Amino acid sequence: MDQDFLVSVLDVHKDNLQFIWPSLVCSIQNSSFISLDCELSGLGSRKLINSQAVDDRFINICEVAKTRSIISLGLSCFKLSGPENDESSKNLNFSVQTFNLMALCSEDYVVEPSALQFLVTHGFDFHKQYSQGIPYYRGNDRAGKGKAKKATWDLRDLFAVVISAKVPLVLHNGLVDLVFLYQNLYADLPTKLSSFLADLEVMFPNGIFDTKFVAEFSVRTNASFLEYIFRSHQLKNMNLKNSSRAHVICNHTLIESDFIDFWDCSPRLQNEEDLEICSNYINHGFCNSESNCKKSHDVYRAVLLEDQKKAKKRKRKDDNNIARTEVENVINITRSSRQERFKGHRAGHDAFMTGFCFASFIAQKMSVRPNGANTVCWKELVAEVADVRNRVCLSGKDFPLLIQKSAFSKCSKSHLEKYERLFPSDEAN
Ligand SMILES: [Zn+2]
């Protein structure tokens, strides 16, 4: 088994949050970057959240974030280890800690039947959410909770810790998640998109990265849903490793406890090779007849086949045969039956996959450096990918949303007040 992809996920809920809190905070504060994923109680009408005009789109997503809720939150903290010896210093060696937090909004909210159905078929445990979800309220901080010593920590405090860590934040297709996080765990949303973007730039001074944007505009994979880009990054990472170039190594460092589940997402083929690949699933990440579909949903196989096709093309062009051996090295892998993917920890799994995609993207940049990858200075590496920084995917558009304060925009009042409470001595804008 590939230990890099035996992910340990810590299950955090109402009954163990206070106990886990110190290690959770420590993990966030020490990370080189954080990846996040939200599970939501619904998205409203797809037509509205994908409106033609981007400003309308924002207003519609805001409305959804005020009426729906976050039902679980996945958080993966990636910490780059220092170069301990020559062997490891040329690679990106990460210590990874992944958390899956069950959330329960204490105000009324809409649960959409379609979202409910989807979550239940993917192993989401609503019973556990209602009995053990960590409660939170939406909107602005409530008075009276300010200076007094807190008895308990909640999800709003957790989001404040994420902001104060001042590390790059990585999301996949992050716009909806950002709007939800803001309204549900930070403050009331501003009415203008320009203010929202100005606020975000201040909240995350080390940048927000969207792995979907990276996939579509920079890496240009065939499909850009999370599992597809994760599997293609796994394959590329393996190719880099096999050719002794800079690659990502993950050490999942959470210690085994009652609250930890292990998720094996190592690259392997499912026993479905006699089945035709379901083109719906492979292009979009979902299939309308998912449970009855007789075709294969093995994303890893699709990614391998695509890679082989490209390798053949390369071989035809240049008969030196190098690309070919790379592919043959990785074909030698284990097979398993269709994987039980989520076990109710989808948010945690998605957060890890998102983080791995970002790490692997950086490693690929390192591997083509002219003078090798001798220095592993995280800040420098992140600075080298500035062209994908603060750019979030807008579905159906051929341009991203830029997270930046424009010359004519102002930060919102809610944000300024909240930020002043979080960092009293800092400049709020
Ligand atoms: Zn299918």
Image (cartoon, rainbow, N blue to C red):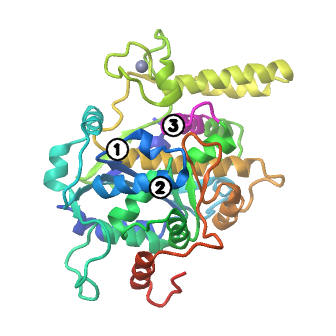
Identify the image quadrant of the C terminus.
bottom right
From the top left corner, tell me how far across and down residue 111 is, in percent: 24, 45
Amino acid type of the residue tagged 3 in the rendering: Phe
Question: Mark 3 or mark 1, which is nearer the start of the sequence?
Answer: 1
Residue designated by label 1:
44
Above or below, comparing residue 388 to residue 427 in the picture: above
Q: Quadrant of residue 24?
A: bottom left
Q: Which mark is residue 225?
A: 3
Q: Which mark is residue 363?
A: none
Above or below, comparing residue 181 to residue 171 in the picture: below
Left or right of 159? Residue 425 is right
SS at mark 3?
Answer: loop
Q: Quadrant of residue 168?
A: bottom right
Q: Residue furthest top?
A: 274
Work out how far the residue at label 1 is from the one at label 3, CA to CA, in angstroms.
20 Å
From the top left corner, tell me how far across and down residue 306 is, in percent: 63, 23
Q: Which mark is residue 58?
A: 2
Amino acid type of the residue tagged 2 in the rendering: Phe
SS at mark 2?
Answer: helix
Above or below, comparing residue 166 to residue 353 in the picture: below
Label 2 CB sits under 8 Å from any ligand 1 atom: no
Magenta run includes residue 155: no
Q: Which residues are magenta?
A: 221-235
